Amino acid sequence: MKWSIHQLSKYRQNGMPIDAEVQLDNVMKRNKDIRHISPVHVKGLCTFGASQMTCQFTMTATLTLPCARTWEDVEYPIEVEAVEVFSWIDEENRGNVEESDIHYVDGEVIDMVPVLEELVLLEIPMQVFKENTEGQVHGGKNWSYSTDEDVELQRKNDEPKLDPRLAALAKYFDQTDE
């Protein structure tokens, strides 16, 4: 989704409709939790001013992420509504670039792909869970899964184990004074 500024001048009157699918495979390199991303569907309208383009759009996609319990694939649909502003004014007229919500364009080409990638990365949740996995995880090699109730029950049933280094000390209190 790249456009030259000169090419966009023909849409100044009525705006430019967007209805496209974009493959954003770079997000999988930027966040290793993403196992797959479907083509991102972007639909909206861009309007133009003297030196800026304002795009109001909705993007939808499906991410494949690992389940936090089982590590199996979970499909996670996302839908983002966004308004992004691209400006191509001269650098001396830009003002404070760090605090602005405007994407400044260097050169003659507007590239929307990095903005779409950032929007996808912001939608990734901390954890996802596959449906109906509660209580199905029992463990694996060198690890096990326990609920708080299981741990409490095991703590009550287990006898306190004595450190073998202190076994002789425990016998000292069993002796009667003579």
Image (cartoon, helix red, strand yellow):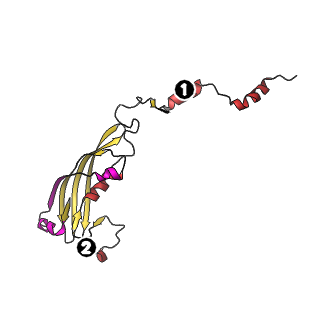
Residue at (29, 65) in percent of width and height = 102
Q: Residue furthest right?
A: 178
Is 6 magenta? The answer is: yes
Looking at the image, is 10 positioned above or below residue 78?
Answer: below
Categorize mark 2 by other alpha carbons within 10 Å: few (<14), some (14-19), many (20+): some
Residue kind at label 2, given as amino acid type: Ile
The quarter of the picture where residue 66 lies is top left
**Quadrant location of residue 90?**
bottom left
**SS for tag 2?**
loop
Q: Is residue 122 visible?
A: no
Residue positioned 32% across, 44% down in the render: 35
Q: Position of residue 61 (x, y in %)?
A: 25, 47
Residue 118's place in the image compared with 148, above or below, is below
Asked if residue 173 lies in the magenta stretch, the reply is no
Q: Quadrant of the C terminus?
A: top right
Q: Is residue 65 above or below residue 173?
A: below
The quarter of the picture where residue 5 lies is bottom left
Residue position marked by numbered label 2 in the rendering: 89
Indicate whether 169 appears above or below 105: above
Please tell me whether mark 1 sits on a helix, a strand or a loop: helix
How far is disc 2 from disc 1 in space, using C-alphas?
68 Å
Residue sitting at x 33%, y 66%: 100
Residue type at numbered disc 1: Leu
Query: Where residue 165 appears, x then y in whole percent?
Result: 71, 32
The reply to whether discs 2 and 1 touch (Cβ–Cβ < 8 Å) is no
Q: Residue at x 22, y 63 (%)?
A: 54
Q: Give whichever of discs 2 and 1 has the lower sequence position.
A: 2
Lateral position of residue 175 relative to residue 162, left or right: right
> Is residue 70 rendered to the left or right of residue 6?
right
What segment is highlighted magenta in the picture?
4-29
Q: Which quarter of the rendered picture does the N terminus lie within?
A: bottom left
| Residue carrying label 1 | 153
